[in-house]
Amino acid sequence: MTTTLSSTEVAVASIKAMESLDPERHRSVTHPEAVNREAANEPLDCRVPGPDGFLATAKWLHGFASDINWEVENAIAEGDLVAVQTTMRGTQSGPFTVHGPDGSVVAAMPSQGRGFVTRQTHWFRVRDGLVVEHWADRDDLGMGTQLGWFGPPA
């Protein structure tokens, strides 16, 4: 029996797929033309459309925090637009890299093995039962402060 997920369920499944490096989990919820608007500062392979780009983002995130996970707090849909409020947690296990337009690393925040907890809101556009667009509002400054990247002046 085939079940059809609601737009909200598809968006939540896309968030939870980021916890996995299983290509099928990403394919099952990501449209071949999907765009991740947050990938502009990620490695080039994260910027390709569709499941391969979303999986590349998951790999990049797992390189930064291998135990990364998202707790879904709330999700709401209106038409094809879905907003998902989350708490992201993890422990930095590798450098966090920021990439320029050509894909080169323009900043690398070294790991000090610290944990982080930060709130995020992810926005999705869903078409034909699959994510076609993603963008987010994140507290990167709060995360960076918890991880020791920023602090009071010496």
Image (cartoon, rainbow, N blue to C red):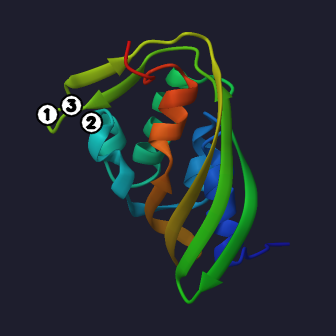
> Mark 3 highlights which residue?
103
Q: Secondary structure at mark 2?
A: helix
Identify which amino acid the numbered label 3 is placed on.
Gly
Query: Residue 149 location, x and y as percent?
Result: 44, 21
Residue 125: tell me if it is visible.
Answer: yes
Quadrant housing residue 108: top left
Marks 1 and 3, how far apart at CA? 4 Å
Q: Between residues 152 and 139, which one lies in front from this camera angle?
A: 152
- For the residues labelled 2 and 3, say whether their Cβ atoms are less than 8 Å apart: yes
Query: Residue 28 location, x and y as percent?
Result: 62, 57
Give the numbered dot on residue 121.
Answer: none
What's the residue at 19%, 34% (across, down)? 100
Question: Is 102 placed left or right of 89 in the picture?
Answer: left
Query: Residue 130 location, x and y as percent?
Result: 55, 69
Marks 2 and 3, how far apart at CA? 5 Å
What's the residue at 65%, 67% (across, down)? 10
The quadrant of the picture occupied by the C terminus is top left
Q: Residues within 10 Å of mark 1 (few under 14, many from 20)?
A: few
Q: Secondary structure at mark 3?
A: loop
> Mark 1 highlights which residue?
102
- For the residues labelled 2 and 1, say whether their Cβ atoms are less than 8 Å apart: yes
